[in-house]
């Protein structure tokens, strides 16, 4: 390969970091709330969704540092992900588990059956919890919804989406696989 412990090969990416997109759009005369701005936003969202879908589900590769400074918007609304210094690999079985969890979270309806389905998805990843939860399935399902659910979903068992809250399901995690 072209990279070794002593040599790192890089390439220049001509684009605008997502963190500076609003300023760049204004320079080009595009208001993000306008029809053109919304079309650009949809194009970027579609490009990011496609890129992440291919990266995770086809290649089994996860970019571990996807903040707005590491996502560049190229001409035409295409995207480039830079700084792949933190990465993880998901093997086929893990990719299938991620897909199963995403699909389960997308149809979550609050029923006991869905809580159990999501809880089982999380446990298949190897996630374990501290003893003492009144309803460990609700805790596990809340972790799945935290990771893969809609932003306005209500967590079961009275758990909170706020990660630092005393009611956060994340506080109940005993172990969580490094590759995730």
Image (cartoon, helix red, strand yellow):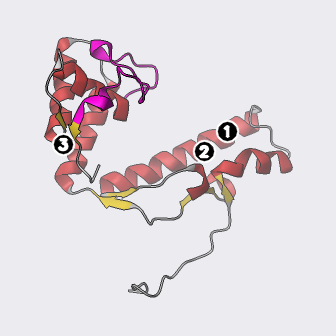
For the point 44% across and 25% down, which residue is it? Answer: 162
Q: Is residue 109 visible?
A: no
Q: Which residue appears at 26% of the width and 28% of the height? A: 104
Q: Is residue 47 left or right of residue 138?
A: right
Percent of width and height locating residue 94: 21, 49
Q: Secondary structure at mark 3?
A: loop
Residue underneath mark 2? 43
Q: Nearer the viewer, residue 40 or 138?
A: 138
Residue 132: horizontal and vertical position, in percent? 15, 21
Instruction: Name which quarter of the figure residue 141 lies in.
Output: top left
Which of the numbered marks, if any, corresponds to residue 125? 3
Q: CA distance from mark 2 to mark 3?
A: 33 Å
Residue 17, relative to residue 102: is it above or below? below
Can residue 139 be seen? yes
Residue at image coords 21%, 57% = 91
**In the picture shown, does residue 122 fall above or below 178?**
above
Q: Residue at x 20, y 35 (%)?
A: 122
Q: Earlier in the sequence, mark 1 or mark 3?
A: 1
Q: Which residues are magenta?
A: 149-173
For residue 64, which quarter of the picture? bottom left
Gap in angstroms between the C-alphas marked 1 and 3: 37 Å
SS for tag 1? helix
According to the picture, the residue beneath numbered tag 1 turns out to be 39
Q: Main secondary structure of the magenta part?
A: loop
Residue 148's label in the rendered image is none
Query: x, y percentage for residue 81?
Result: 52, 60
User: Viewer-nearest of labels 1 and 3?
Assistant: 3
Q: Comparing marks 2 and 3, which lies closer to the viewer?
A: 3
Say whether marks 1 and 2 touch (CB < 8 Å).
yes
Confirm whether the magenta stretch covers residue 102. Answer: no
Mark 2 or mark 3, which has the lower sequence index? 2
């Amino acid at each position: 390969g072209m990279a070794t412990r002593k040599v790192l090969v890089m390439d220049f990416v001509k684009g605008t970091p997502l963190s500076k997109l609003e300023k760049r759009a204004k320079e080009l005369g595009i208001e993000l709330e306008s029809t053109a701005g919304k079309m650009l936003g949809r194009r970027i969202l579609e490009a990011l969704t496609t890129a992440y879908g291919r990266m995770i589900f086809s290649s089994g590769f996860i970019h571990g540092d996807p903040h707005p400074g590491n996502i560049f918007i190229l001409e035409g609304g295409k995207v480039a992900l830079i700084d792949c210094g933190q990465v993880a690999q998901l093997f086929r079985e893990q990719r299938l588990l991620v897909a199963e969890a995403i699909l389960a979270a997308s149809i979550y309806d609050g029923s006991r059956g869905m809580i159990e389905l999501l809880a089982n998805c999380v446990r298949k990843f190897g996630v374990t919890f501290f003893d003492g939860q009144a309803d460990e399935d609700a805790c596990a399902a809340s972790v799945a919804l935290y990771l893969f659910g809609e932003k306005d979903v209500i967590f079961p068992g009275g758990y909170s989406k706020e990660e630092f809250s005393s009611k956060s399901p994340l506080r109940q995690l005993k172990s969580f696989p490094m590759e995730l």
